[in-house]
């Protein structure tokens, strides 16, 4: 059963990876780098500050830092435990496209997927009272980040699906922590000004 799932994952990887268009390679290589999302994070923190308060922003920064540290360590622990080679380390990559700047050894599950979906979930819940469509934009961003990992040849779809699912759960749990802390310190949000 496990071997059959691995085979399906490999075939699906090759199919999706080979959908790439050379003229767009630069975009996906750019998108997959972690530093690319820093301006978005800055905008999101500004929006949280603008719609809530400096104290809520402080709580948010602490919770996000804890969450990112958790997702990073959890992904690394899982990669070292399962030791599943990334597709870019497999012989069949000659039938695919490897575009990333580097290829780590193990890839199950995707750290990009868990962290981006966790951030999308947490921030969406925080900003939902103020921005009606925040869920759509945040999850579109998370999807693009995670798909880029297949596009550049460093993760299987199974790595992405597992990481994304865990990211949704993690983001929600850390949102609950955020809610608990803002309630404990009596940090009331501003009146709903959604548009």
Image (cartoon, grey):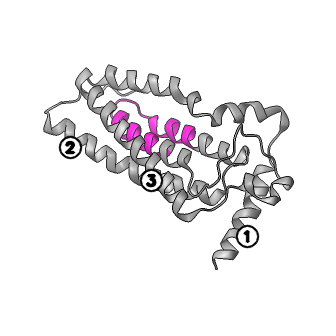
The magenta stretch spans residue 19:
no
Q: Secondary structure at mark 1?
A: helix
Say which residue label 1 marks. Answer: 7
For the magenta stretch, what is the residue range? 117-142
Q: Which mark is residue 180?
A: 2
Mark 3: few/some/many CA within 10 Å (<14, 14-19, 20+): some
The spot of residue 173 in percent (x, y) is: 33, 50
Foreground mark, 2 or 1, reads: 1
Q: Nearer the viewer, residue 101 or 50?
A: 101
In this view, 138 is above or below 105: above
Residue drawn at x 33%, y 19% is 50
Kindly report the secondary structure that dominates the magenta region of the rendered protein.
helix
Say which residue label 3 marks. Answer: 74
Quadrant location of residue 22?
A: top right
Q: Secondary structure at mark 3?
A: helix
The magenta stretch spans residue 140:
yes
Q: How far apart in space, not on screen, are marks 2 and 1 (Cα)?
A: 44 Å
Foreground mark, 3 or 1, reads: 3
Residue drawn at x 59%, y 28% is 36
Q: Which mark is residue 88?
A: none
Q: How far apart in space, not on screen, are marks 3 and 2 (Cα)?
A: 23 Å
The spot of residue 154 in percent (x, y) is: 68, 49
Foreground mark, 3 or 2, reads: 3
């Amino acid at each position: 059963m496990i071997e059959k799932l691995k085979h399906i994952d490999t075939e699906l990887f090759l199919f999706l990876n080979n959908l790439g268009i050379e003229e767009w390679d630069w975009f996906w290589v750019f998108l997959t780098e972690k530093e690319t999302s820093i301006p978005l994070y800055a905008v999101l923190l500004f929006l949280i500050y603008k719609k809530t308060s400096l104290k809520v922003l402080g709580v948010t920064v602490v919770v996000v830092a804890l969450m990112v540290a958790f997702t990073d360590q959890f992904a690394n622990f899982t990669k070292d435990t399962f030791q599943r080679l990334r597709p870019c380390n497999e012989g069949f990559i000659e039938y695919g496209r490897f575009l990333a700047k580097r290829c780590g050894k193990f890839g199950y599950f995707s750290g990009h997927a868990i962290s981006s979906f966790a951030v999308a979930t947490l921030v969406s819940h925080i900003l939902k009272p103020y921005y009606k469509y925040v869920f759509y934009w945040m999850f579109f961003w998370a999807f693009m980040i995670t798909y880029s990992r297949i596009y550049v040849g460093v993760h299987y779809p199974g790595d992405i699906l597992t990481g994304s699912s865990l990211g949704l759960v993690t983001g929600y749990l850390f949102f609950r922590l955020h809610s608990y802390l803002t309630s404990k310190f009596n940090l009331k949000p501003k009146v709903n000004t959604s548009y």
